[in-house]
Amino acid sequence: MTQVTQEQNVQIIKLVNLDYRQYLTPDEVSDIEHEVSIMETKEAAGIEALKIVQAGRGWVSDDSLLAISQLLKISTAQLEGVATFYNLIYRQPVGHCVIHICDSISCHLLGYEKVLEAIKSHLAIDYGQTTADGMFTLLSNVCLGGCDKAPVMMIADKHYEQLTPEKAITILNGISQKISTTKKETLEHEEE
Amino acid sequence: MTADTKPLTHLINLNKPLSIEEYINNGGYQGASRALKDLTPTQVLNIVNDSGLKGRGGAGFPTGMKWSCVPMFTNEDGSQKDNAPEYKYLVCNADEMEPGTFKDRYLLEGHPHQLIEAMIIASYTIEANRSYIFIRGEYHLAAKRLQQAIDEAYKNNWLGKNIQGTSFCHDLYVHSSAGRYICGEETALINALEGKRAIPRAKPPFPQFSGLFGKPTVVNNVETLSNLPHLLKNGADWFKGLSPKSDPGTKLYAACGRVKSAGVWELPMGTTIREILYTHAGGMLDGLNLKGLLPGGASTDFLLPEHLDTPMDFESIAKAGSRLGTGGLIVLDDQNCPVAMVLNILRFFAQESCGWCTPCRDGTPWAVEVLTRIEMGQGTVDDLDTLANLCDFMWLGKTHCALAPGAVEPLKSALRYFHDEFEQHIDHGCCPYSHHYSHVRSVNSANYTKAVVKQRGL
């Protein structure tokens, strides 16, 4: 990563050094090192490392990327190329839950567009956007392998099948209620 | 359901797959036991070759032939040759992302030990000491169950060092992917496993010589591998007897779309489309008629109702002008627009193109643009020529891998079979089915705008 400053009309680009040990948690480091141990090269653990960091932090920030590239001794540019190639790695902040709605052929034949429309209206977001309360991000996904129970969507690691507009909204309300309750309880717990 | 007619699926339990004890009590790990204790790798290879087992991932390449190319490094006295690499690899391709295909998910979620046993047999045959199950990132439940099963297998000495007292050692890992359809292509999958962008490699060298980390590697589909325990247990003749009229073995066929009961069924190879669609899937939903179907996932050519009596095997489907692919029927009814269907499929391929070669990177979005125009009622007769030309530009031999030709197959066949519908769109200036598919661009719908205004207090 670089920091650009202006000094007497000269652009100075400083390389920012970041120590991965100060940035990644010991758990993250040991998980990544385990992945390295089952592969022949360090580079091969790159995708898994991005997933490990994302699992705890929600998304992969520039600092996360830099820390991982340092730990695995690969160039930041190369890791960025990898991170932006795969659709399940998020390089931008996302909401608490990411909705992946399947837009492939079986779901199309069973009218997923109506479900999508309902979700968009209900949450007032379009693809790639996050709700104002930071609860949901909406993304499309290729075939989720639930064609016999289409239309399908995936939220976190759970698949929801045979959706109708009403069913989808009930599911979203349920999730958002559950999360708010947990958040409230944690807050109360902390206050005590 | 019995072991004799449905060997792959008769023990499947989607709610709670068999534990290793339950599987062993039901005859599990006998195939691996026979291979490891009674047979040499060459003998196992001969059985697989005799059986005529063909790959179930889509291309239908004979499995034994694929394995026989792997260089072997063991001397006759059992010692290793000097030039033996530290590792050889087996990779299970569980990156099931072909639209309309969900058969591997059943095997992975419902019967993980069958796959583990199969991988032990395959690894033993090619002398691989490490293997990976490359599973798509969206299959969380399957990955979890596989990991549990692998842990059980390690505890029971079916994986690890000196398996069941033999000299064979093997480690098996689950690698969960981070998305992208192209990872299903075997050389792209190898790049993905190496932590790179999943761009297919040029062949040769074939993975059997230089694959994962430059070492000999075999990549096999989940269903292909799952046949092995039964093949080893019962022999090649039994396997051929499973489907007397056609390619050997059983096949997991599936059907989806607006049919009465979509699902997946293990049937003898060569079961007719009619039987799958009408006996097993229960036929079309009431009030709908069959208009066409894709026999093996989104990247296969359309077939018509006149092809209903075609047996679903590699040769017969090829004769009818399509490909068996994954064996998952995608059924088009007469109230869904064929142009919209092709548009959806091409949009999928345009999005999933890895971007490496120009015909695919630029051709697929171009086709989407033209198809969108036609579907919206703004197409011209020239657009049909453009699509036909694109089919030619993206055909086999002009692209880096089979993704773009896979996109061409449904497009080209739709242009042939549904020519009238394409012309109707152009002549009438609208989609004749528009009551169903009116929201090609639904972003700025009135509802959406209203909701935004309400929520943001504008």
Image (cartoon, rainbow, N blue to C red):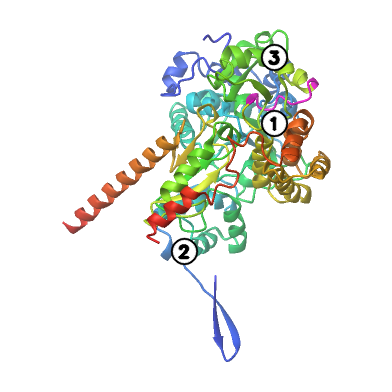
- The chain under label 2 reads A
Q: Position of residue A104 (x, y in %)?
A: 59, 37
At label 1, the amino acid type is Thr
Look at the image and say whether residue B332 sits in the magenta stretch: yes
- The chain under label 3 reads B
- Horizontal side of A91 relative to B305 (left or right) equals left
Residue occupying the point 60% across, 30% down:
B100
At label 2, the amino acid type is Tyr
Residue B74 badge: 1
The quadrant the C terminus of chain B occupies is: bottom left
Residue A33 visible: no
Labels 2, 1: one chain: no
Look at the image and say whether residue B167 sits in the magenta stretch: no
Q: Are marks 2 and 3 in contact (CB under 8 Å)?
A: no
Labels 1, 3: one chain: yes
Q: Looking at the image, is mark 2 or mark 3 nearer the viewer?
A: 3
Residue B270 badge: 3
Quarter holding residue B95: top right
Q: Position of residue A150 (x, y in %)?
A: 52, 31
Q: How far is the residue under mark 2 from the one under mark 3?
A: 57 Å
Q: Position of residue B150 (x, y in %)?
A: 48, 31
- The chain under label 1 reads B
What is the span of residues highlighted in magenta in the rendered image? B319-334
At label 3, the amino acid type is Gly
> Dot 2, crowdedness within 10 Å: few (<14), some or many (≥20)?
some
Residue ranking furthest to the front: B428
> Dot 1, crowdedness within 10 Å: few (<14), some or many (≥20)?
few
The residue under label 2 is A20
Q: Position of residue B327 (x, y in %)?
A: 65, 24
Q: Is residue A1 above or below residue A179?
A: below
